[in-house]
Amino acid sequence: MMQDFILQAGDLDLLVQAIRKEGFQVMGPVLRDKAITYDTVASAADLPQGWTDRQEKGCYRLERRDDDAYFGYAVGPHSWKKFLQLPRRQVWKARKDTNDIQVTEITEEPPRMAFLGVRSCELHAIAIQDRVFVDDQHSNENYAQRRSNLFIVAVNCTSAAATCFCTSMNAGPKVTLATDLAMTEVIDGDEHYFLIGSDSYRGSQVLRQLPVTPSGKRHEEAAARGVQNAVRQMEEGPRRFDSSDLKELLYRNYESASWDQVAERCLSCANCTMACPTCFCSTVEDTTDLSGDHAERWERWDSCFTADFSYVTGGPVRADTRSRYRQWMTHKLATWHDQFGSSGCVGCGRCITWCPVGIDLTEEVRNIRELEKPGPEQ
Amino acid sequence: MQEPTKPRLAVWKFASCDGCQLSLLDCEDELLQLADTIDIAYFMEASSRQVAGPYDLSLVEGSITTTEDALRIREVRAQSRALVTIGACATAGGIQALRNFADVEEFTAVVYAHPQYIATLATSTPISAHVPVDFELQGCPINKRQLLEVISAFLHRRPPQVPPHSVCVECKIRGNVCVWVAHGTPCMGPVTHAGCGAICPTYNRGCYSCYGPKENPNTESLCHWWREELGAERVTIIENLRNFNAAAPAFERESRRQASTGNQEQADGQD
């Protein structure tokens, strides 16, 4: 997308208000409980201006920046999936009459939402979930409805967290997928502005309401330098790896000793899957009331790390942690290709940060590779 | 016309504080419907009316701490079509299982003016150590919604929706920021059975596992990170493993391991 206009940082609220005026509820980054989470944004004052996140495995800390950047953080505990694939929702309710059972589907007027500040990895994650919930044979109507109205304002990353590895997964940091608006935040000396562009009709309708000016070469170069900075941080970081042969690597290593090693540390608590922006598994819970005349079905997030997830008559197929971690990682990085035509990982690093005991997917890949190498001749 | 017989419910108390039974009385909005649906045949906390067994569903609160109770629970089992334990005492021995790690005679000598009148077992054990149990509802105290769910499930012969996964799943579904990762607060959530709705982390406190272990808990790995990365003292780790669910096997094993490692370190330090 061409980002060929300049929006002064002081005018950012005009963007928020213009989107709201189009009838969208704006969702974006806000400070909550010492983290940058995604929630309703009423004005630019709600954004985490001047804050950033320091991330390492099993550790997230909110910190002050030495500038006033609005989008100067990487990714937080939430992903956008919580607005599209609801964590918990009622599917139907039923009532027993004398002769039959009346089932009523629970439907909602899908909200018109705008996501403000979507990163490239997150755009890829939404595209992956689209393939699961909309394009695949088993569509999820609730997701599809929420998704169809969505207005997206993407933001290029100009710095990366230590846990980021989107370059290794070919999912960023530069925004390449279609959005309504895309921006790059630039702080250059006394100047603070956004390079902004649209490639949808709706985006252009918003853009024309803003006091933007045409950008010059120097603005575009400054923005490109920012994105390049994020690329460099990841390329020089310890988590960069070659993902081109992951599928074959994992298919060859069902019995790797690495699975036993990671199982000693893994808590099977499911945090990685809940934090992951592409993990899509859910379950349904059917209940009755005391009388037995009323029943309900609820859908909620589930995880391949729980025992109930693989329960079939007699017990869970994956009873131990080794088999659960292997299932998750092999699906994410290998079998996902066969199932949906892409990797299930976008390199956002959430599973690394939000694992309580700091299990690092990139380390696990490296470990599998190391253990596969032939040892010294006996 | 005679009404169809309602299923009979009995509620039993063993060594416990009565809090879990109270959860049933706390179901204020549903109590009338409950009384409509089932015959509350034996529930001494609520009524002095006692209907003789057998019972369709027995809810058992409390642990076994005396020889009399060890016999009485067999009688309860014999009279019950389904037996469901409620609470940490009945499923894991409760706070009184701290005696399992110490000398109960020493405890009685400290607490009672005339300990010679106290006849008690050396251990506090869960109901499942004595009789077969059809379902265990964890929590200290139990959640009244879950209790209603279990009663409804047994009445209508369907599986209860009481998932045994971690508290973390509840936190994430609520959208909570993880207190462990974002604040460095030690939290038992990753090894703790869900059901409370993640109350403590929702108010920025660490979980202290009043619901006891989840299925497949990795307490050793959790304790290792608490100590090495979150800077928790060994005594804090042991205290969190030894509260209401001290005798739950996953917690007992790890607290004993922590205690013996701590003793060993102390001995080494004195050399």
Image (cartoon, coloured by chain):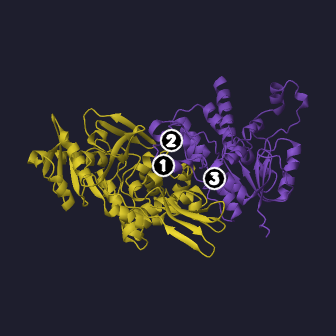
What is the crowding at mark 3: few (fewer than 14 residues within 10 Å), some, or many (at least 20)?
Answer: some
Q: Image point 36% across, 51% down: which residue? A: A348
Dot 2 or dot 3: first in sequence order is 3
Q: Image point 61% across, 45% down: which residue? A: B219
Q: Is residue B182 left or right of residue A4?
A: right
Residue most extreme to the bottom: A99
Label 1 residue SS: helix
Is the Cβ of the residue at disc 2 closer than 8 Å to that at disc 3? no
What distance separates the C-alpha of mark 2 from that of mark 3?
Answer: 19 Å
Q: Colour of chain B?
A: purple
Q: Colour of chain A?
A: yellow
Which one is closest to the eye, mark 1 or mark 3? 3
Considering depth in this image, is A54 or B110 the residue closer to the camera? B110
Residues marked 2 and 1, same chain: yes
Residue B174's disc is: 1
Dot 2 or dot 1: first in sequence order is 1
Check the residue under mark 3 and report the chain it is in: B
Q: Is residue B30 left or right of residue B231?
A: right
What amino acid is found at the position of numbered circle 3 in the picture?
Gln
What is the crowding at mark 1: few (fewer than 14 residues within 10 Å), some, or many (at least 20)?
Answer: some
Considering depth in this image, is A338 or A377 the residue closer to the camera? A338
Residue behind mark 2: B202
Which one is closest to the eye, mark 2 or mark 3? 3
Is the Cβ of the residue at disc 2 closer than 8 Å to that at disc 1? yes
Residue behind mark 3: B146
Check the residue under mark 2 and report the chain it is in: B
**Residue B13 x, y percent position in the rendering:** 79, 45
**Residue B4 x, y percent position in the rendering:** 77, 67
